[in-house]
Amino acid sequence: MENEKKDLPNKIQIFDNSKIRSVWDSEHEKWYFAIVDVVAVLSESENPQAYWRKLKQRLKEEGNETVTNCHTLKLPAADGKMRQTDVADVPQLLRLIQSIPSKKAEPFKIWLATVGGEFLDEAVDPELSIERAVQNYKNLGYSDNWINQRIKSIEVRKALTDEWDKSGVKKGKEYALLTDLMYRTWADMSAKEYKDFKGLKKENLRDNMTNLELILNMLAEASATELSQKETPSTLNESARIAVSGAEVARDARKSLEKRGGTVISSKNAKEIGTQQLPFEDHQKEDNSF
C-alpha cells in the first residue's frame, strides 16, 4: 500500500476499553492499525511512543522484516492533526506481538482475527455496524439512555451531511467550517472552545456530550437539514446561511431552558458521564440549577 493513498476510511477500534486507530484498505481488503496504539495496550507503558521507538530500533538491528516493510499513513494525532503514523496489517502485527511481553497478547490475537470479518459482514448488513457501535459504547461505560441518543444523533448528522454533499459542500475543511459555525451559533462556542471547555484533545466532541447537549445539537442539525431540503442551496455560502438558521432553532431552545435557571452546556466529558448519565429531570437536580 502506497503512503500517498488518500480517502481511506479511518476508524477507531475498541480493545479492552482502549482505542486503536485503524484504516481500511478497500483495494487489498484489509485493516492497517496504528502500531503505537497496539504497543500502548500490550506494553501498558506510560510512554508508548518511546517504547515503540526503542523496539523498532532493536528489531531493525536484528534485521526484522516486519519493521522494514511497515508503512506509514496519516492518522489523527493527539493534537487533532493528521500525522504520519507507523501502521501494520494483521500478519505484521501478529509478528510484532511476539516481541512484546504481555498477558494481553493472546486475547489481542483473537480480537485481531475477528476485526476483518466483522467489517465485511457490516458492509453487507449495515445494521451490524450499528449493533457493534452500541456494544462499543456499552464497553466504554455509557448508559443505555445515552447510547440511544448518540445513535440517533449519528443518523441525524448523516442526513445533514447528505444535504451538504448535494449542495457541493466538500468533506474535510468545508464540513468542519459549517459544523463550527453551528456550534458557535447554538452553543456560543467554537468546536475548539467547546472541546477545551470539556478538557478534550483528540476525542470526539459528541461522544462527550450529555443527553441534553446531544438533543440540542440534533435539533440544530435536523432543523438545518429540513431547511436545506426546502431551499436546495447550491453554494457553500447558502449552506452556511442555512446551517446558522438551523442552529438558531437550537439556540432559542437553549436560551429558553436557561431562563428557567438550567445549566445546558456542561463541562462534563465522557469520563464523568459514562454510566452516570441521567435524563434531563435528574440532570437538573444533579447540577443544583433548579
Image (cartoon, helix red, strand yellow):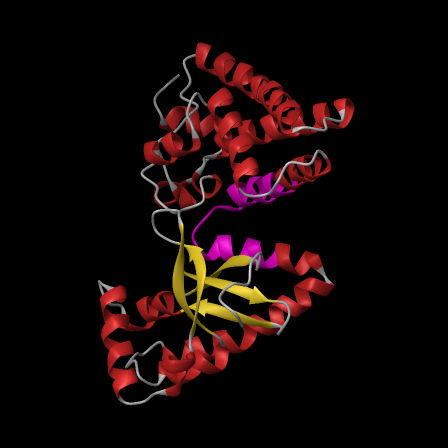
Q: Position of residue 226 (x, y in %)?
A: 72, 26
Quadrant in which the N terminus is drawn: bottom right
Where, by quadrant of the figure, is residue 16 drawn? bottom left
Residue nearest the observer in this picture, 140 or 22: 22
Residue nearest the observer in this picture, 219 or 260: 219
Q: What residue is at 57 percent from the left and 37 percent from the top?
A: 175
Where, by quadrant of the figure, is residue 95 drawn? bottom left
- Left or right position of 122 against 273: right
- Left or right position of 58 against 34: left
Where, by quadrant of the figure, is residue 233 drawn? top right
Q: Position of residue 13 (x, y in %)?
A: 48, 62
Q: What residue is at 27 percent from the left and 68 percent from the top?
A: 44
Quadrant in which the C terminus is drawn: top left
151 in the magenta segment = yes
39 in the magenta segment = no
State which region is magenta.
Answer: 131-155
> How many callouts does the rendering have?
0
Q: Position of residue 77 (x, y in %)?
A: 37, 53
Q: What residue is at 51 percent from the left and 12 percent from the top?
A: 256
**Residue found at the very far top of the displayed protein:** 259
Q: What residue is at 48 percent from the left and 63 percent from the top?
A: 22
Residue nearest the observer in this picture, 59 or 39: 59
User: Vertical placement of 284 versus 97: above or below?
Assistant: above
Q: Main secondary structure of the magenta part?
A: helix
User: Vertical placement of 82 versus 218: above or below?
Assistant: below
- Left or right position of 11 against 200: right
User: Vertical placement of 272 versus 284: above or below?
Assistant: below
Q: Position of residue 74 (x, y in %)?
A: 45, 59
Residue nearest the observer in this picture, 256 or 231: 231
